[in-house]
Amino acid sequence: MSVHKAFRYRLDPTTEQEQKLRQFAGARRFVWNWALQQRRDYYRQTGKTVPPKELSARLTALKDQPDTAWLRDMDAQLLQQALADLQRAFSNFFARRAGYPRFKSKKAELARFRIPQRVKVVGNRVQVPKVGRVRLRLSRPIVGPTKSATFKRDACGHWHVTLVSDRVVTAVTPPLPEVRQTLGVDLGLKDIVVCSDGQREPAPRFYRQAERKLRRAQRVMSRRKKGSRNRAKARIWLARVHQHVANQRTDFLHKLTTKLVKEHAAICTEDLSVKGLARTKLAKSVQDAGMGTLLWQLAYKGRWYGTHVVAVDRFYPSTQLCHDCGFKNEALRLAERTWVCPACGVRHDRDHNAALNIRDEGLRLLAVGYPESQNACGRDVRPACAGSPG
């Protein structure tokens, strides 16, 4: 079984190298827009989609034209990858996973391009075809041979490269964990995670802390004349504030998820609808917490380290169920952070009780298997109440 792992580094190109990278990004944008127009014209004329081979042949002929002869100086695989990216965009559109592909603007679109082969790291530099060896900040070594490389320039003007490595690992199904090795995780806004073992991690709220700086930077940029150098400087200042907040959140979530995955044999979480929560009045706090990124990191890091990661159905009443006797308190309100079970009289902390129930339900799903615990609609077939595994 092969595992793909991405390594992202910041580049320190020279002035000539950065100019070449910009040219590559411009060539990729030009080919994308040209191919999109070709597909639209072909569909209007014939009512069909232009075959990929014919579109590739047209691109080869485009290099022989005087006005577009400059494409010969670009990397050939880069241009072909632009056609592949457009084909994937149309596949996602027809599968209703994305909208209709749009033309890319030079001002609005961030400079980026992808080279599927022939990019490798040599020492503390990355070898790029027709650019040479570009210095990079090698923060960690790459494990396995590199397959593809994506170059991107962020809003602050910094270039980054993302290298995808492919390594073969032995497919071993991890054994079923014990209760003490399993962790139930309840997500929230006050505490980003509340674990079944009592561990709590307060939400750092990086965006909230930086709102004053963001307001000032946005106000300064809005007062600058459009197209002026001062506005460009203000835009970079604003982008750096946003980037600092994003870096803080990413660093926090990576450290948290790596710690949880390495210390436990199984992690049970909620299957939250983050997109739905982002449409409520709590949208800013939900996005500031990074709940979707946290669940995503737990999922793929669980595959890396051989840890079970189970997602409990989002409609499972983990908060309302008493972990001791299984009584369901349907009258529980959102403002009640603690509650006393009417059946057994035990006082519960709302979040900790939910984490315990999520752990028990996750263990049940691991024991019986997902195929037997889902109905024809893909929903969980679960017992009416939850109780302690004893």
Image (cartoon, rainbow, N blue to C red):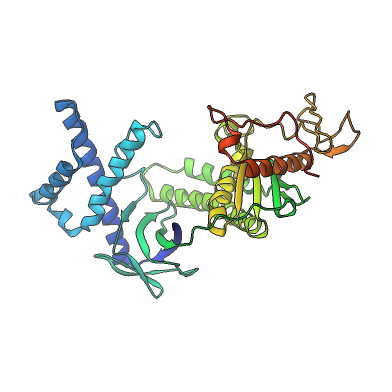
Which quarter of the picture shows residue 106? top left
In the rendered image of this protein, does residue 230 appear above or below residue 333? below
Q: Looking at the image, which residue is at 80% across and 24% down?
A: 331
In the picture, the quarter occupied by the N terminus is bottom left
- Quadrant containing the C terminus in the rendered view: top right
Q: Position of residue 98 (x, y in %)?
A: 39, 34
- Tell me the residue at 31%/36% (across/down): 90
* Number of numbered discs on residues: 0
Q: Which of the 4 quarters of the picture holds residue 260?
A: bottom right
Where is residue 128? Give x, y as percent.
30, 65
In this rendering, does residue 261 appear at all?
yes
Taking the spot 45% from the left edge, 67% from the top edge, the residue there is 143
Horizontal side of residue 350 vs 49, given as left or right: right
Residue 331 falls left or right of residue 54: right
Of 65 and 310, nearer the camera is: 310
- Residue 200 lies, in percent from the top left, at 75, 50
Relative to 86, residue 177 above or below: below
